[in-house]
Image: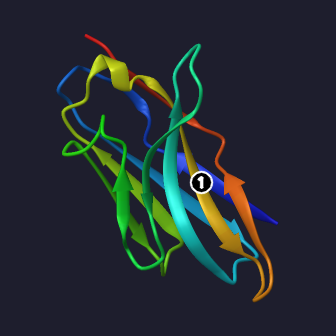
Amino acid sequence: QVQLLESGGGLVQPGGSLRLSCAASGTIFSINGMGWYRQAPGKQRELVATISAGGRTNYADSVKGRFTISRDNAKNTVDLQMNSLKPEDTAVYYCNMGVKTSIWYEYSYWGQGTQVTVSS
């Protein structure tokens, strides 16, 4: 069994910064892709940023230049540094990881979500 634990959400003023972290624990052989997604009230969950096992990153157009995703393979963690936050960034943020629990099997796991609110 694998669990993802997120931290770092909260309330921040427009223009401020937050850093989200997500740590995986449990039976982990290796981790392929990692990513952050978000869901605002009344909207579908959307991709924010992803990072491959090799470090290739991909960002939603709405966050390019403001958010940075990074990973620590030794610690099985993925972080999202969010700068220049806007009210439209308000959402519940979820981390996702493609975890191989053995050499044969990979599963997609989600964190429980952490609230980010950008408001003055």
Q: Residue at x 35, y 20 (%)?
A: 88
Quadrant of the image for the C terminus? Answer: top left
In the image, taking residue 50 as reference, residue 95 lies left or right, namely right
Q: Amino acid at mark 1?
A: Asn
* Front in this rendered view, residue 16 or 52: 52
Is disc 1 placed on a helix, strand or loop?
Answer: strand
Residue 41 appears left or right of 100: left
Name above or below for residue 113 compared with residue 57: above
Q: Mark 1 packing: few (<14 Cα in 10 Å), some, or many (20+)?
A: many
- Image x and y of residue 89, in percent: 36, 26
The reply, left or right, for residue 82 in relation to residue 90 is left
Residue furthest out toward the front = 61
Q: Nearer the viewer, residue 103 or 29?
A: 103
Q: Which residue is mark 1?
A: 96
The relative height of residue 12 versus residue 110 in the rendered view (above or below) is: above
| Relative image position of residue 15 (x, y in whole percent) | 17, 26
Q: Residue 63: x, y in percent?
A: 29, 39
Q: Nearer the viewer, residue 35 or 111?
A: 35
Q: Give the residue furthest to the top.
A: 120
In the image, 73: left or right of 15?
right
**In which quadrant of the rendered view does residue 12 lie?**
top left
